[in-house]
Amino acid sequence: MTTAPDPTTSMRTHRCGEVRPEDVGRRVRVCGWVSRRREHGEHLAFVDLRDHTGLVQCVVPGTVDVRSEYVLAVEGVVRARPAGTANPDLATGEVEIQECTVEVLSVAEPPPFAVDDRVDADEHLRIRYRFVDLRRPRMQANLRLRAVINAALRAGMERQGFCEVETPLLWAPTPEGAREFVVPSRLQHGTCYVLPQSPQLAKQLLMVGGMDRYYQIARCLRDEDLRADRQFEFTQLDVEASFVGQEDVLRFVSEAVLDAAERATGTRPSEIERLTWAEAMDRFGTDKPDLRFGMELVDLTAVFAGTEVRALAAPCVKGIVVEGGGETTRSRLDQLTDQARQLGGKGLAWFRVLPTGEGGTGLDGPLARFLTEDDVAGLLVATGAAAGDLVLVVADEHLTVCTVLGRLRVLLGGRPVSEGPYRFAWIVDFPLFEGIDGDGNPVAAHHPFTMPHPDDLDRLESDPTSVRSQSYDLVLNGWELGSGSVRIHRADVQSRIFAVLGIGPEEAESRFGFLLGAFRHGAPPHAGFAVGIDRLVAIFAGEESIREVIAFPKTQSGSDPMTGAPKPVAPRVMADLGLREVPAPE
């Protein structure tokens, strides 16, 4: 990150953190907040003045009536610090400003917490006083890193011929699955806009309009429960291009994201790895694999194909090896078993690998005595487990096995998402449908405009849940950064998808008529993607929550303690909108 080279304004000649030995002898004027004041008798006072670039020590003759977080303008002459008083921990530690005159620009109440990264304040208090919290070096660095990443993403897209276009914030309901924020219309009572979950349909219309390559740093909103990687409001790099396929989009996005990573870290990551959805589930038990550590799932179905142990007789059996985990206590193993059940599994089989007297290995665990010699040998060979290791095994339906072991893998071997190295992965060939609803219709895994894999189109009606889509996700260190797909632009394919989903022509026209109508006027083949900027910045900033890289986030409950939002609106406003208050649902 770089700082603008010329800080000169009518109020200052230098920024606080940029005064250097080469400025010795110069008369300078700096502005900032009081970090600390120290009195040396009645004849001398030291004021540490801070702005976003850092801190400089100012020596004031006599006394000065200022307190922490007062805003000052200080004018004086730069001098080298006396011998033995230099501060190697400060960029300005070799110099100080002497012969200072002080102008108080603004007084301040005592801050609610120390404006210092050495002190951790309660998060709710920090958000309540976010305007103070933002002065902390950590928050300044995070938001400035965000600006650097945004600039790199923009430059990467523009270099590849993309045009930035803003799309509406007041929109019609969209078929993306998440709950939307609704905005009642004042002019048409009984009707509403929604705030966009994404610019999905708008950017597809831009392709019909011939924009060819579009991008936007887009603000999106979803009324979903908040967590460390989710806020009501979020920002994404939104991309769409015409006359392209999946490989083109992956190349466009990879270029921009790797540019951002290089700007943020100083090192360009290697080419992004690629896995199919099926491979990611089989090897890691999740479609958001963390590639920074091993502990991959091992298929043991063939090993236990003829087993008489009922707990291991299932359509799918897999295991993970916890290296050195043989010392895990029984109480901890019981906890893991409970967690496996909470995740949907029938249970968890565990085996400690023990050395035998002949230099070999054997197994210990509740089920070990029921295994044949062939079972034991097969498990040890398949897993590669050695003495002192722990093997965890789940037997169930394939998806359940993968999901349970995938969660246990992260629980036992994972590390903070923000901790390097940074391992990106493209996940491709997702299922087109994620299950069957209560009416027997498939449920679209993404949205109903995702193009099926061309090799699977012949099974669309006969075996829809086996059909792959031309959709793809970008993952970093176990967090999903974004998703995208090749879009359906052919009327015949779109009609087949609607029919499979149980959406009749009238419903399709009612819900998506404006898009379908546009497609009838000549839609080019097109595809797109969206990258979650909040998550990307959080990882590179070393943060585990996106709240730390957002200027004004909401709390976990969705409230804003700084402004008091959400708040009731005045009865007059309710009347203007044609609304009345009703009791909250029980």
Image (cartoon, helix red, strand yellow):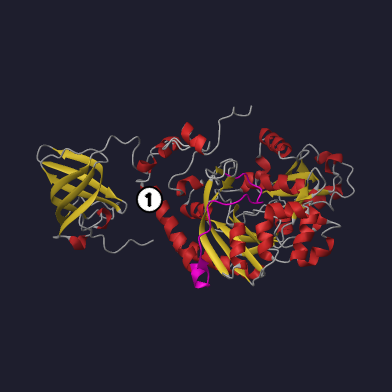
Q: Is residue 160 magenta?
A: yes
Tell me the SS state at disc 1. helix
Task: State the residue position of label 1.
Answer: 140
Identify the residue at horizontal 12%, vertical 42% (top origin): 44
Specify start and end residues of the magenta stretch as a single range.
156-181
* Left or right: 227 as drawn, with respect to 444: left
Q: Residues within 10 Å of mark 1 (few under 14, many from 20)?
A: some
From the top left corner, tell me how far across and down residue 562 is, in percent.
41, 37
- Residue 424 image-quadrant placement: bottom right
Looking at the rendered structure, the number of numbered marks drawn on it comes to 1
Identify the residue at horizontal 33%, vertical 41% (top origin): 115
From the top left corner, tell me how far across and down residue 100 is, in percent.
13, 49
Q: Is residue 135 magenta?
A: no
**Quadrant where the image shows the N terminus:** bottom left
Q: Is residue 403 visible?
A: yes
Q: Nearer the viewer, residue 544 or 163?
A: 163
Secondary structure mostly taken by the magenta-highlighted segment of the chain: loop
Q: Amino acid at mark 1?
A: Gln
Q: Is residue 82 visible?
A: no
